[in-house]
Image (cartoon, grey):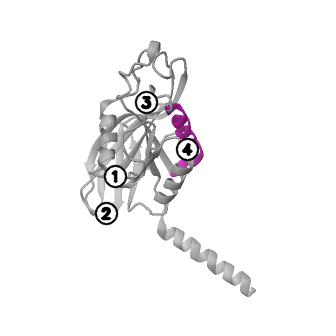
Amino acid sequence: MSSGKLILSISLALAALGSAHAGQPQPVIVELFTSQGCYSCPAAEKYLGQLKRVRGEEVIALEFHVDYWNDLIWGSAGNWEDVHSKPEYTLRQRRYASARLQGRRGVYTPQMVIGGRYAAVGSAGSTIEKRIGQVQREPAPLTVNARLDARNLLVEIAGEAPDGAAVWLARYDLHHTTEVTGGENHGKKLENYNVVTDLSQIGTWQSGGVKLTVPGVALGDNQGCAVFVQKQDLGRILGAGRCPRES
């Protein structure tokens, strides 16, 4: 074997060894705070759908619909009450506004929060891609695995991270189409992706690992779910995993 081929073989072997030790990267949680009553939000919702399709296993895209647009009157078109909105998602966004995020902070739509660390305008694709890359270059300290067994969701979390983090289960609908008849987007047909229908804390991270059983979880054809661990103050997301059967 020539010296050049030998060096290449050693390099490939070392790369494979390093990859094995690094383990499989955890997906990046990308949260879009949006509203069907917001004129500039459909572009961000379309971009979220593209992220979901193009980035595949790298990203878990979640769409949170806030409620503070619901009562706003838009001339003769009146108001539009977002059919997916919930006050608890508005509260989550406001808590993020008080957190130490990098980027464009505050309460506005459309807003994306990447990895619990960065904030950006939800349609600013180049900025969001850059932030996703930054999160990926700093591997999550925890590994989250979830699987369905009958009607139970079984979750196993391992790794090294400080105690005091919450384990969250986000359940969502994969796709919705809505004919909007009022507000700024009246007359439009809106496409929404990975619309969060429920966000609940299912446990607390403890050093040494956590195993959880969540009863009563069954996914329909248009449903998915994800589990992630996040600091209690809505800081960095320490690990994330999608539930099986998402399409």
Circle 3 packing at 10 Å, graded few (<14), some (14-19), many (20+), is: many
Position of the N terminus, as image quadrant, is bottom right
- For the residue labelled by badge 4, is the local secondary structure a helix, a strand or a loop? helix
Identify the residue at the far right of this view: 2
Residue 51, numbered label: 4
**Circles 4 and 1: CB atoms closer than 8 Å:** no
Most foreground residue, 214 or 50:
50
Asked if one can make out residue 162 in the rendered structure from this viewpoint, the answer is yes
**Residue bounds of the magenta highlight:** 41-58
Circle 4 packing at 10 Å, graded few (<14), some (14-19), many (20+), is: some
Given the image, on which type of amino acid does mark 3 rest?
Ser
* Among numbered discs 1 and 2, the one appearing first in the sequence: 2
Is residue 133 shown in magenta? no
- The percent position of residue 20, horizontal first and vertical second, equals 51, 68
Given the image, on which type of amino acid does mark 2 rest?
Ala
Circle 2 packing at 10 Å, graded few (<14), some (14-19), many (20+), is: some
Determine whether, in the image, residue 214 is placed left or right of residue 132. left
Picture residue at 60% right of the left edge, 76% below the top: 13
Distance between the alpha carbons at the discs numbered 1 and 2: 10 Å
Distance between the alpha carbons at the discs numbered 3 and 4: 18 Å
**Circles 1 and 2: CB atoms closer than 8 Å:** yes
Mark 3 vs mark 4: in front: 3
Given the image, on which type of amino acid does mark 4 rest?
Leu
Mark 1 vs mark 3: in front: 3
Identify the residue at the far bottom of this view: 3
Most foreground residue, 45 or 53:
45
- The percent position of residue 207, horizontal first and vertical second, equals 26, 62
* Among numbered discs 2 and 3, the one appearing first in the sequence: 3
Residue 161, numbered label: 2
Locate residue 54: give its quadrant.
Answer: top right
Is residue 50 shown in magenta? yes
Mark 2 vs mark 4: in front: 4
